[in-house]
Amino acid sequence: MSELDTPRSDARTWAHGSAAPEKRVLNIGFMALSDSASVVVAATQGFAEKHGLSLRLQRQASWAALRDRLISGELDAAHCLYGLIYGVQLGLDGAMPSNMAVLMGLNQNGQSINLSRALQQAGVTNGEALAQRAHQSSARLKFAQTFPTGTHAMWLYYWLASQGIHPLRDVDSVVVPPSQMIEHLKAQRIDGFCVGEPWTAKAVEDDLGCMLTTTQAIWPDHPEKVLGSTRAFVEQHPNTVRALIMAVLEASQFIDANEENRRSTAQLLSGSDYVDAPLSAILPRFLGHYQDGLGNAWQDAHRLRFHGDGAVNLPYLSDAMWFMTQFRRWGLLRDDPDYLGIAQQVQQLTLYRQAADALGIACPEPMRSSTLKDGPRWDGSDPAGYARSFALHAMADQPALSA
């Protein structure tokens, strides 16, 4: 028996006897984004092997392609948008509804909203000026996000609404894969975008416009990408899923442990097999160094983070419920869903806690509270009331995406 076949400790002998992964070689999808870091590190730096797994990383061209391959079983698990998992669960994003699973959170923070150089040169460099342009110009502004139910769509809609701009009436919204945002901006096909790093930093670096806001300015330490799979995969391979969570948790710990590790991870990600972007666009924001293209530079207190002593990685019920409140707010859902019940089905809290306990990682409470920009406090206690509480919404008068 090899070392990998031998349970590492009593903590790895689970209720059904053996802790050995049912499936050892996994196909793992990811997108060319800086927040894929913990999955890439787990696959390439020995963390997966330590837990009896071999991870075959498969970079995807778009979130829609990743979704389809995850549902079909071509991918066993993937670096996912939070809202993608819940869009599929609720049947909102063009695919047949499927029972999905959030295994763990992968990161918090680290996305931004950028404007084009043409708007910057016209003096549109803040929310007030953008609102004036959106309401008074005969030409509608066009903003790109990365997936209809994804985090970037929700951050973009939330921020625009906070500036008095109705995201479904006052501007147009289009879907563009993350790595194509720069080309669309350069070709003047869009006026701005919301996307993850390194593409917002590269747009500033290439003098293609300015950054209006970070998403952590909207919601400090907000949920972002998750490790996702189908629920069928979890039910058929619980030991595999537990081992996968443990591998990615240890990779997350490694990245956040010190600056040297963040630097080495940024260097790894810059390679052509992963994010394939200049280190100069990846590293600064790994370290919390920001420039907005308007002459401002700062050290962000809520930089892209991957572990935070476990605070990042728990699949919080309240985080999942927040995305559903925004689907309801913007008319993607016709009626209020069973917010808590659906979150309890999708969030794999039991497996996550078993993995975290085996590694000695603390597990916070699954409901957390936050105050978002210009919004009421969110704690998950009244999701239906929260969805209705905003001055701008589109619950009754917009076509729903649900079947």
Image: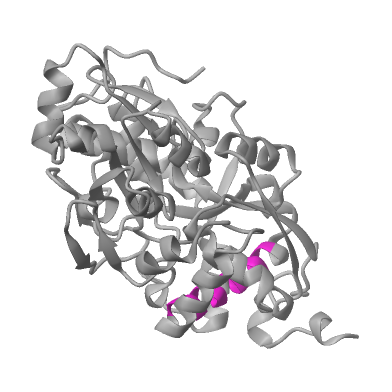
What residue is drawn where x is 48% and y is 33%?
176
Position of 341 relative to 33 (above/below): above
What residue is at 58 percent from the left and 70 percent from the top?
268
Image quarter where the N terminus lies is bottom right
Residue 213, placed above or below residue 304: above
Our reading of the magenta stretch's main secondary structure is helix
Q: Position of residue 39 (x, y in %)?
A: 59, 64
Depth order, front residue of 241/80:
80
Q: Is residue 6 above or below residue 93?
A: below
Viewer-side residue, 207 vs 321: 207
Residue 212, quarter of the rendered image: top left
**Which percent across, then down, holds residue 302?**
27, 65
Residue at the image point whose x is 47% and y is 37% from the top: 183
Say whether residue 197 is magenta: no
Q: Which residues are magenta?
A: 241-256
Residue 196 on image: x %, y %? 41, 50
User: Is residue 313 at all visible to an observer of this figure?
Assistant: no
Place residue 332 in its image quadrant: top left
Which residue is nearer to you in this view: 249 or 205?
A: 205
Q: Quadrant of residue 40?
A: bottom right
Q: Is residue 252 magenta?
A: yes
- Give the number of marks: 0
Q: Nearer the viewer, residue 17 or 100?
A: 100
